[in-house]
Amino acid sequence: MGMTITEKILAKHAGLPSVTPGQLIQSSVDIILANDITAPLAIEQFRSSGTKTVCDSNKVVLVADHFAPHKDILSAEQCRFVREFAHEQQLTHYYEGGEMGIEHALLPEKGIVKPGYVVIGADSHTCTYGALGAFATGVGSTDVAAAMVTGETWFRVPESIRFVFNGRLQPWVSGKDLILYTIGAIGVDGALYKAMEFTGEVMKYLTMADRFTITNMAIEAGAKSGIIVPDGVTKDYVQDKIATPDQIAYYSSDTDALYSDTIEYSVDQIEPQVAFPHSPENTRAISTVGSVPINQAVIGSCTNGRLEDLKIAAHVLKGKKTAPSVRLIIIPATPWIYQQAMRLGLFEIFMNAQAIISPPTCGPCLGGHMGILARGERAITTTNRNFVGRMGHPESEVYLANPAVAAASAVLGRIGSPQEIGVEEYS
């Protein structure tokens, strides 16, 4: 019996010829990630172990991105604590201030995560890196601490579900819509502790930005990980980011690999999706949304803050104004994306539309800062979660959508599509 891409990567890192779903393994880890919220606890646990130095100063990656730039004294103290540890341990990869980007956009951009890697991170959206053909999953801060000591962690090998996307994408449909549609179909526990493997003819037409968005939200279906078998698009991306691409191990799934399920979708039938409060599974096609007034639109996050996302938003917003009742917040995910958006003139479009441009930060996505909602306010956002109180007051509401829909909604003052404001599809 063959193996899936996930099983092959885990077998390699466990030093075994093969693994099967349900098997407990001890695996080496290539990247150990934490941020300004999750790293302090991991560091405390690391110190309590009595270990003086981390297993590998190249493998431990710390990014101050959630409450940074510091929103208050507590967040400043957390970042100071993490910064001092990074300097003490002489970590190669510590990012703060002008070097800081949203972790799950920053690491691929800098070529830190490679195809075939095993990555753990004290952040649930660590599964983002599966777009590169890596096994990546979120863990607790204590698991990160143990890995910082040993360079290893344990896994129960997950079963894999194969999601096959066939057909032709409809106008304004992106990776965000494919994953929202999928979560709406299977539910927030539809892939519980499974590896979601995304495939099908549509995948070859999706950019890396779309692919990162899809794997980023695998966790919203309860998955252990999301993954896409590397192809030419992946390899072109890697060639541009990694100094020694010839040394990369690319894995694929065997034709006789065993899946717990195979689910096929015809994307011809999928419209842009909107997830209503208070769950990513509460999805509706844009044509069925009705009239939902909004107070805020956010375009950014580790899900949709990449340059491609900002280009689409600028295309929709060009020559238009944000509705008087709406705050439009644009958050480039990394300093490089910020700089490129500025060079391409996207900021001028955003500012002419009366948008607020934020430095890179997770900020409002987790109700941190830079866009907190008051009681009764509604936001449409390109982030990944819309739980009760996720972006502020527990009596506020968060709606999830792609960047084009979020931008069009900012202009309309209600949730709507780019077609409603006369914008032709971005190409």
Image (cartoon, helix red, strand yellow):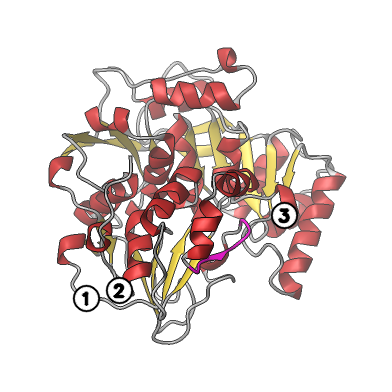
Residue sitting at x 42%, y 20%: 251
Give residue 45's position: percent from left, percent from top.
72, 54
Residue sitting at x 40%, y 29%: 6
Badge 3 marks a residue whose secondary structure is helix
Q: Would you name the residue on which mark 1 appears?
A: 291
Q: Would you name the residue on which mark 3 appears?
A: 45
Badge 2 marks a residue whose secondary structure is loop
Q: Nearer the viewer, mark 2 or mark 3?
A: 2
Which of the numbered marks, if any, corresponds to residue 321?
A: none
Give residue 71's position: percent from left, percent from top.
68, 71
The amino acid type found where label 1 is placed reads Ser
The amino acid type found where label 3 is placed reads Gln
Q: Horizontally, is 127 left or right of 45 in the view?
A: left
Badge 1 marks a residue whose secondary structure is loop
Q: Nearer the viewer, mark 3 or mark 1?
A: 1
Which of the numbered marks, if any, corresponds to residue 414?
A: 2
Quadrant that contains the C terminus: top left
> Dot 1: few (<14), some (14–19), or many (≥20) neighbours within 10 Å?
few
- Look at the magenta stretch and give its main secondary structure: loop
Q: Does any portion of residue 190 appear in the rendered image?
A: no
> Dot 3: few (<14), some (14–19), or many (≥20) neighbours within 10 Å?
many
Residue 399 against residue 232 in the figure, above or below: below
* Mark 2 to mark 1 CA distance (whole Å): 7 Å
Magenta stretch?
354-360
Quarter of the image where one finds residue 146: top right
Q: Nearer the viewer, residue 197 or 402?
A: 402
Quarter of the image where one finds residue 210: top left
The amino acid type found where label 2 is placed reads Arg
Q: Does any portion of residue 128 appear in the rendered image?
A: yes
Nearer-N-terminus badge (3/1): 3
